[in-house]
Image (spheres, helix red, strand yellow):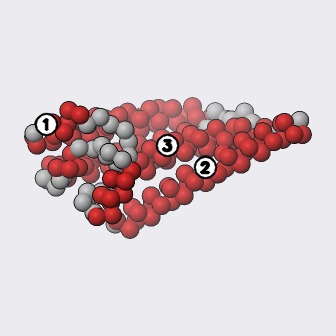
Amino acid sequence: MNRVIDGFFRVLEFLVVVCMVAMVIMVFGNVVLRYGFNSGISVSDEMSRYCFIWLTYIGAMVAMREGAHLGVDTLIKKLPLGGKKFCFFMSQSLMLFCNVLFLMGTYEMHELQVTNISPVVGISMIWVYGIGYVVAVVMGIFNIEKLWRLFRGRVPEQELIQVMESEEQVLEVSAHGKVAQ
């Protein structure tokens, strides 16, 4: 199962790279065409915006898996173990609630987005905003998994503090396998 999850996130990381490269090529190419040849590619503006939307959502999923989202741990570090567990429970529960709202909102807007056609590219906007389904489900599964491990007593104390100090620490922790993902 871990191999499937790792493979899924490798695909997501690849898509982040593809979106970034596509954005750079489209925007840079359009700038060169506008200033150098007094022309441009109208599709590139819209498609680079869509790539940015997907890049943001996919990056959020990857960052959640790696524990790389921003957070403040000043209070959490000073709490006893029970307080840390309560805060962990509350944060995961609130994130799960937000993911449920995000999924419901995407569903509510689905019919509108299917019939809404982008002005230049001519695709249904569900291809752009439908990523909300994937993001809400994937992040919700992570929240449920963390809550399940908390209830079973399988969350180590260092994972209860969900903020990493620096990239070096994240790399060190993942290299030594101290924090279970």
- Label 2 crowding class (10 Å Cα cut-off): few <14, some 14-19, many 20+? many
Indicate which disc residue 57 carries: 3
Q: Which residue corresponds to the image point at 45% horizontal and 58% vertical from the top-left?
A: 9
Residue topped by disc 2: 19
Vertical placement of residue 98 versus 15, above or below: above
* Residue 165 locus on image (x, y percent): 32, 45
Which one is earlier in the sequence, the residue at label 1 or at label 3?
3
User: Residue 78's quadrant in the figure?
Assistant: top left
Residue 130 seen in render: no
* Residue 76 locus on image (x, y percent): 20, 36
Q: Nearer the viewer, residue 76 or 134?
A: 76
Residue topped by disc 1: 79
Vertical placement of residue 12 versus 91, above or below: below
Assign the N terminus to one quadrant of the image: bottom left
Distance CA(mark 1)–CA(mark 2): 41 Å
Which one is earlier in the sequence, the residue at label 3 or at label 2?
2
Residue 82 seen in render: yes
Distance CA(mark 1)–CA(mark 3): 33 Å
Q: Which residue corresponds to the image point at 44% horizontal and 64% vertical from the top-left?
A: 7
Distance CA(mark 3)–CA(mark 2): 11 Å
User: Residue 3's quadrant in the figure?
Assistant: bottom left
* SS at mark 1 in the image: loop
Assign the C terminus to one quadrant of the image: bottom left
Closer to the eye: label 1 or 2: 1
Q: Amino acid at mark 3?
A: Tyr
Q: Nearer the viewer, residue 58 or 171?
A: 171
